Amino acid sequence: MCSSDLTMRSLVYSVANRLDRAENGPEEEREYLLGLVELMTPIVKAHCSDLGFEVCVTAMQVFGGYGYTGEYPVEQNTRDSKISSIYEGTNGIQAMDLLGRKMRKGNGALFMGWLNECNLELERAKATGKLDEEVSALERARDQLGQTAMFLGGLGMQGKLAGAMLNSYPFLQLFGTVVLGLHALWQARIALEKLGGASDADQRFYKGKLANARFYAKNILPRATALSKAIQAGDETALEDGLFD
């Protein structure tokens, strides 16, 4: 969960940075930057708020049976963080917005813009020669995300909108997992660049970024595979009429 915490901060700061650049930078970059902000907004709001709650729940486990008491701030954080998944558009609504609007906008232009950035970062990380396992793991997850997006797009083209939207939240989880994996890799690549001339204290910080990317690739990114397979299984049991009569 700590690995997710570090990557979520990176994503939120990155999206805020793009918004500032869109508002104050060159006019020719404005549309592109705002498009990426638009695409990432459901992931920042929904995926990060759900993970943030999970982080708090995991933190409570440190205290054992004594954790859910007012003596410790984590109890307050856990209760306070839950509302984030409900207000400003519940996370289920955010997921439907991502799949039903953002992924379709401009015939997939927003998604392709993000995908191009993802590929560029993968090439930069690959060029270091020291992040091969992490790069390979993210490449697999990227491909699974793309295949799943095409599968859901195909359902939409067939008029099976209910079947597509049934998987909107798992798709948001899949997309969010890959996006945060990209941020873990990005931080690790920058850490490699800084590590050589860093002080002892800074070296510990940068080595932590490398460890975070390794942990994310091995322990969290595999969830993308499971989500992709579940979505592409195409199960619509939940939509069957009279199932619970």
Image (tube, rainbow, N blue to C red):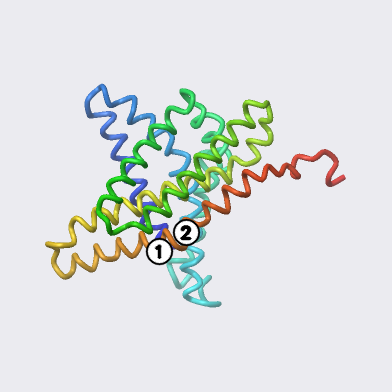
**Which residue does the numbered mark 1 point to in the structure image?**
215
Q: Is residue 242 above or below residue 80?
A: above
Marks 2,1: beta carbons within 8 A: yes
Q: Secondary structure at mark 2?
A: helix
Q: Position of residue 200 (x, y in %)?
A: 16, 70
Using the rendered view, name the quadrant where residue 239 is placed. Answer: top right
82 and 179: which one is in front?
Answer: 179
143 and 231: which one is in front?
Answer: 143
Which of the numbered marks, if any, corresponds to residue 50? none
Q: Position of residue 166 (x, y in %)?
A: 66, 40
Q: Position of residue 147 (x, y in %)?
A: 53, 40
Q: Is residue 145 above or below residue 69?
A: above
Q: How many marks?
A: 2
Q: Amino acid at mark 2?
A: Ile
How far is disc 2 from disc 1 in space, using C-alphas?
7 Å
Q: Quadrant of the C terminus?
A: top right
Using the rendered view, name the quadrant where residue 131 is placed. Answer: bottom left
Q: Amino acid at mark 1?
A: Phe
Q: Secondary structure at mark 1?
A: helix
Residue occupying image coordinates x 34% and y 57%: 132
Residue occupying image coordinates x 37% and y 62%: 214
Q: Position of residue 139 (x, y in %)?
A: 42, 48
Question: What crowding class fits label 2: few (fewer than 14 Cα within 10 Å), some (14-19), or many (20 or more)?
Answer: some
Residue occupying image coordinates x 54% and y 34%: 97
**Which residue does the numbered mark 2 point to in the structure image?**
220
Q: Is residue 25 above or below residue 123?
A: above
Q: Quadrant of the N terminus?
A: bottom left
> On the picture, is 228 further left or further right than 39?
right
66 and 232: which one is in front?
Answer: 232
First along the sequence among labels 2 and 1: 1
Question: What crowding class fits label 1: few (fewer than 14 Cα within 10 Å), some (14-19), or many (20 or more)?
Answer: some
188 and 63: which one is in front?
Answer: 188
